[in-house]
Amino acid sequence: MAQPNDSALEGVSPEDQGVLARFFDQASEVMTVVDCEGRFLYVNKACERVLGVPRDELIGLSAFDFIHEADRDETVSEFDKWMIEPAREAVSFENRQISRGGEVRRMLWTVRVVMKDGDVRGFTSSGRDVTSERAAANALVKSETRVRALMEGMLDPMISIDPRGIMLEASDSVRGLFGYEPSELIGENISILLPEPYRSEHDGYLEKYARTGATWILNTTRTFEVSHRNGEMRWVDISVSRVEVPEESEPVFAGSFRDVTARVEAEEARREIERRLRAVFDQTFEFVGLLDVDGAVLDVNRAALEASGESYEDVIGRPFWETRWWASDPAERERVKRAVKRVAKGEFVRFEAEFSGGTDNARTVDFSLKPIRDTAGEIVMLIPEGRDITELKQAQMRETAMLKALATIGESAAVLAHEIKNPITAVNLALRAVADQLGEGQAEILEDLASRMQRLEKLMRRTLAFTKPLEMQLEHTSPKSLLDDACQTLRPEFESKQVEVKATATETCPDVNVDSNLIEEVLTNLLHNAIDALEQGGRVRLSATAAPGGGVRLRVEDSGPGLTDSFEDSLFRPFFTTKAEGTGLGLAICRKIVEEHGGTITTAKGELSGACFEIWLPVAVKAGA
């Protein structure tokens, strides 16, 4: 290699060298000046970064030391040629550089020979890192090779088209689905593979997309029919994507077709089975549903929806215990929630529940909840079932009430016989008296006789009424109105005895669903007893409050002498009375009415020191009970 006599920058003023240095340092490309031995005389910052060596250390080092060994001999050979036959124009060549840290870059160099007085004094060069470009080019070649291999080996047919629908490429697998050779499809419009009306409309879809950008098929998977060469129709899933081709002005659309004919036919058969099962599911009169293991509603039949008054969309996905079926009673909601947790662990739960459906007329339901397991034994769903047994329970309650009444009458048969015997004896004596004293005192005797017969008739009438089941007409009523109506009915009697009466209800007291006439009969009976117990004057208090735990509590109390403790156990028994003219059925009928409303009646300690009766009624009462 020729030896230079002086520096390649000889003759350049220090000021100009500074300007050049600042210019070179701002360049993104590698800039170097080397002498005739290839030693660095100048490098810019980009060179420092590429070679991984500070600039001060690079000066004087051989540029050949940083050339990859695979390219070093060829580069040195070119360098020697330039020394012997200097090129007048810039020369480009490419090699691999290796940094001090071992990082390899592919560089594209532009080299110029520095001449002075006809002699080569050195070389200036600029280098651009083309590592990523070469890698991309290599990757593209490999990618094209892979694409060709994929097109030949794909199981699902792949077809690419231009914006006018002309097929550009087709995989070998089009033979099985469409019956064509790939070469037969190239250059044809893809509409030949579509049935009507898509065949005639397809070019219009492409034209609309080109004009507006609106599309219904790009980047989605759609299922529709395609046509085989022999006219047979096949169902396919097709996915279409837009591909931007480098250096091409138009995009390419690639579509992948998957034959799903068997799946579509199987799904249609499954849907037909589901339609039949759904018809059975919806036509059953029982309330049936499906829940997930957490209790969310997955499905529900028509009978259950009609009972709740909600739509299908309203209940799907909601926790079962938060639906309107259990809206009236927080305790019932909590009970159902606990049942879901138990069944999710494998238990079977069954109980009777009040099933309101968000209405005032609750229904009594024989409710059950059971788990469904998959083939591996894991619980995957829960089935809630409810059978409306309201009428059955009503019949049972009527039958029970009848049996209780008959049993009570049987227990009191002796008392009843005695009560009937005495009036009959008196009638006989009176008749004898009439016969013996005809003409004297006849009016008085006959009046006494009529009174006794009336008392006997009243006793028999109330006894018969007690044995019959109640027929209730339920209505939504405020407790305060029940109290006021009862007070208004007996207002003349209160005023005649100068009794102070007061009825109150708290703001939090809920409304009740009861037979107003029957509850008023209970209240007026209790008020009659209070009036009878009071001398001239006295006080009577009626109140309605929300009961702890739910329901309504009614109280009737007076300032009279109160109840004798020894009588409390017998107060509600038929034919027990402490009044000379009493029948002993008043309180017994009161208890019957309250109990058939689902409530209770008891004695309590009042604030007026007299008798106090407390009635508890549920907010919702079973219709027709």
Image (cartoon, grey):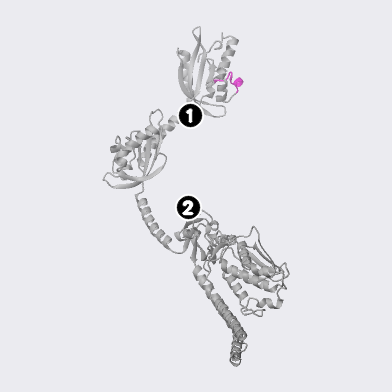
Q: Secondary structure at mark 2?
A: helix
User: Residue 132's mark?
Assistant: 1
User: Residue 261's mark?
Assistant: none
Q: Mark 2 is on which residue type?
A: Glu
Residue 73 is one of the magenta-drawn residues:
no
Q: Secondary structure at mark 1?
A: helix
Q: Is residue 143 visible?
A: yes
Nearer to me, 616 or 355: 616
- The stretch in magenta equals 54-62
Q: Mark 1 is on which residue type?
A: Ser
Identify the residue at the far left of this view: 230
CA distance for labels 1 and 2: 56 Å
Of mark 1 and mark 2, the one earlier in the sequence is 1
Total number of numbered discs in the rendering: 2
Assess disc 2: are there few (<14), some (14-19) or many (≥20) residues with their C-alpha within 10 Å of its C-alpha: few
Nearer to me, 266 or 204: 204
Residue 596 lies in quadrant = bottom right
**Residue 610 coordinates in the image, percent (x, y):** 72, 71
Instruction: Nearest to the eye among marks 1 and 2: give it.
Output: 2
79 shown above or below 200: above
Assess disc 1: are there few (<14), some (14-19) or many (≥20) residues with their C-alpha within 10 Å of its C-alpha: few
**Residue 144 coordinates in the image, percent (x, y):** 39, 34
248 shown above or below 259: above
**Residue 528 coordinates in the image, percent (x, y):** 65, 72
Left of 173 or right of it: where is 488?
right
**Residue 572 coordinates in the image, percent (x, y):** 63, 76
